[in-house]
Structure formats: structure tokens, C-alpha cells
């Protein structure tokens, strides 16, 4: 991990294609800068004051020239648009088998928890060659999770989950930054990403965890706060049944239908009155000041697995 690299390492599967687009943009810009500068210099010298040249103004249409400077820039712009759009959607669509890791931004640190329960602060351990999906949110203000060597950067927002993914291709350590000014100690909100061989990563998971997965921790919190008293499978239940809810369509009192993804689950815990489920009264209290973001992540993870298996739709959001 070099301190002042001329260019960041290419350490992810998408880094090469991102760099190719970047250098293509630089190349196109340089071409037109050089062309315009040369023409400007030539015309300035040729038509300078005192030089005997034909200065007669001729008003004559040149359809070929006009089509040339319209069609060529248009084709170049469309080509860049299609190329960049493809890379954008590719970067926003993680593989179905991607390993999920929760990231919480907090003034001024990155708090990370793996689904198997392993916790890290300002460090992220990942296996080589395995797609990794980061599920991110903020406990306070807007942050931005930036790994230059992987060519990924995503804003991390309070009250909302955002995601990004990568596949590491080189073993080593890489810089991790917050790329959004988030307060007085923003410059100290840095860390490192450690890419390990799969076997070494498994050993790290086995030796650095506490044998309590995020889902099991969320289940314990679910029971501690008595959530099951209202969300039980009974006709007299005061709240909707939560088993199998994740990823399903939920009908609201106002007639709308929403998908019970991570964002919906988190909002329903923090602000239960925001989206009232049809057929139920708004009696649930808010847990915004009761649960910290890590505990909220754990309960959401438990709800995602409450039906005995991961809800595929919820996992994609």
C-alpha cells in the first residue's frame, strides 16, 4: 500500500474497465484541446495585423463541414454515454452470491460487521476473488465510502441503506477513505482494506468472531424488546406478522403497495408512523433513540432471515 501512488492500484475486477473509460475521456479531451490550440495558433499567426492575406468575408454554406462537426461529436458523446451507462449499471448490480457486509459510518470512524458476527473498526477484511456487497448506512451525517484501488465510492446516508460491491483481485492492503466532509475530524476517518486468500480469510473469521451471527444477535434484541408480543402469528395480533415479510409486497392504509426491503424495515422501526400497514392501527412506538445503528442492522438482518431463508428480493435491495 503505497503512501503517494501516481495512480491507485488496480485491485478489483471492475478497476480496469473504469480506468479505460477514464483514459478514453482524457484522450478525447486532449485531442480537441490540441486541435483547437493548434488552429488558434495557426490562425493567429496567419491573420496577424500587417500580414498580407486574403481577408475577404465569403458567406458560403458548406453542408459537409457542418454535418461533420455535428455528427462526429454526437457519435462520440453517444458512445461515451452508452459505455459509461453500461459500467454504471454493472457496478450497481452485485452478483446473487455476493457476500454481504454491513458498514456503518459514524463521526469519525467506519464500523463494520460481517454476517457471521465479526466486527471491525476502520478495517475491512475480504477474501480474494469473492464478490462482496457492502450494505451501508450512517448513524449521524452523510459520509462517503471510498476505496481508490477498487474504483468504488458511494455516499453513506443516515436513515437509508445504500450499497456497492466489488471483487478483489489482488492480495494486499489498500486505502479506505471518507470522501465526504463530515465534520472536524473528517480527515482522520481513514482505514484499510485487507484482501486475503480465501483460506486465510476463513481462519480470520474463525479466530476474530464471537460465535454470534448478526441474525442471532438481532433475534435476541427482538425478544428483549418484546417485539413478538405484537407481531405474533395470531388473529388477535396487534401488528403484521413478520415471518416471511422480507421481500414481499405490503399494502398500506393509503392504498400504496411497497416492497419490504431493508429500507422499509429500518424505517418501520425508526418511524413506525411513516407507512401504516392496511388493517392495523399506528400504535407502535419509535425505537429511533432506543437502538443504535448496529443494533438496528442486526434486527433488520434477523427479519430478512426470519422465514427460515434469505428473501431474494430483499437481498437485492
Image (cartoon, helix red, strand yellow):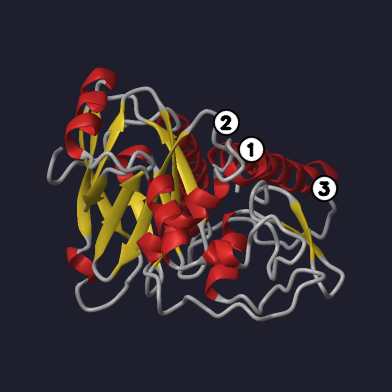
> Looking at this rendering, what residue extends furthest in the top direction?
199
- Disc 2 and disc 1: Cα gap in Å? 8 Å
Up-down relation of residue 139 to residue 47 (above or below)? below
| Quadrant assignment, res 140 | bottom left
In the image, is residue 188 above or below residue 122? below
Please name the residue shown 53% across and 79% down the image: 286
Is any part of residue 23 visible from this angle?
no
Whole-percent x and y of residue 172? 19, 30
Residue at position x 55%, y 69% in the image: 269
Q: On residue 96, which mark appears?
A: 2
Which label lies toward us, 2 or 1? 1
- Residue that carries the numbered disc 3 in the rendered image: 62
Residue 40 vertical position relative to residue 244 in the rendered view, above or below: below
Q: Which mark is residue 265?
A: none
Residue drawn at the location 12% of the way across and 45% of the way down:
3
Residue designated by label 1 = 312
Of the 4 image quadrants, the one containing the N terminus is: top left
Which comes sooner in the sequence, label 2 or label 1? 2
Q: Is residue 144 left or right of residue 231?
A: left
Q: Nearer the viewer, residue 283 or 178?
A: 283
- Dot 2: within a 10 Å radius of its alpha carbon, few (fewer than 14), some, or many (20 or more) residues? few
Q: Residues within 10 Å of mark 3 (few under 14, many from 20)?
A: few
Work out whether mark 3 precedes mark 2 in sequence or the reverse, and give the earlier one. 3
Asked if one can make out residue 140 in the rendered structure from this viewpoint, the answer is: yes
**Residue nearer the viewer, 43 or 103:** 103
* Residue 54 rendering spot, x and y as whole percentages: 64, 56
Q: CA distance from mark 3 to mark 2?
A: 55 Å
Q: Position of residue 38 (x, y in %)?
A: 47, 48
How many numbered discs sit on the rendered protein?
3
Q: Are marks 2 and 1 in contact (CB under 8 Å)?
A: yes
Distance in Å between CA atoms under marks 3 and 1: 59 Å
Amino acid at each position: 500500500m503505497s503512501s503517494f501512488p501516481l495512480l491507485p492500484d488496480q485491485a478489483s475486477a471492475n478497476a480496469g474497465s473504469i480506468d479505460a473509460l477514464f483514459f478514453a475521456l482524457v484522450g478525447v479531451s486532449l485531442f480537441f484541446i490540441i486541435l483547437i490550440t493548434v488552429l488558434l495558433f495557426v490562425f493567429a499567426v496567419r491573420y496577424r495585423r500587417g500580414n498580407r492575406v486574403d481577408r475577404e468575408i465569403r458567406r458560403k454554406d458548406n453542408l459537409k463541414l457542418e454535418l461533420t462537426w455535428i455528427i462526429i461529436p454526437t457519435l462520440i458523446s453517444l458512445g461515451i454515454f452508452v459505455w459509461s451507462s453500461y459500467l454504471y449499471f454493472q457496478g450497481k448490480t452485485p452478483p446473487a452470491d455476493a457476500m454481504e457486509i454491513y458498514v456503518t459510518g459514524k463521526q469519525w470512524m467506519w464500523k463494520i460487521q460481517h454476517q457471521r458476527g465479526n466486527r471491525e473498526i476502520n478495517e475491512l477484511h475480504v477474501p480474494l476473488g469473492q464478490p462482496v456487497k457492502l450494505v451501508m448506512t450512517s448513524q449521524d451525517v452523510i459520509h462517503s465510502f471510498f476505496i481508490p484501488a477498487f474504483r468504488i465510492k458511494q455516499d453513506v446516508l443516515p436513515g437509508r441503506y445504500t450499497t456497492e460491491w466489488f471483487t478483489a483481485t489482488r492480495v494486499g492492503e489498500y486505502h479506505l477513505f471518507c470522501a465526504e466532509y463530515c465534520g472536524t475530524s473528517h480527515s482522520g476517518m481513514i482505514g484499510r482494506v485487507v484482501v486475503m486468500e480465501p483460506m486465510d480469510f476463513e481462519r480470520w473469521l474463525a479466530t476474530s468472531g464471537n460465535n454470534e451471527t448478526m441474525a442471532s444477535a438481532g433475534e435476541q434484541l427482538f425478544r428483549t424488546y418484546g417485539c413478538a408480543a405484537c407481531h405474533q402469528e395470531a388473529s388477535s395480533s396487534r401488528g403484521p406478522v413478520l415471518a416471511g415479510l422480507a421481500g414481499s409486497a405490503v399494502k398500506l392504509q393509503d392504498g400504496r403497495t411497497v416492497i419490504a426491503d431493508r429500507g422499509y424495515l429500518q424505517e418501520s422501526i425508526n418511524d413506525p408512523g411513516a407507512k401504516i400497514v392496511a388493517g392495523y392501527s399506528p400504535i407502535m412506538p419509535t425505537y429511533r433513540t432506543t437502538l443504535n445503528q448496529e443494533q438496528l442492522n442486526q434486527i433488520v438482518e434477523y427479519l430478512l432471515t426470519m422465514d427460515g431463508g434469505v428473501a431474494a428480493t430483499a437481498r437485492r435491495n
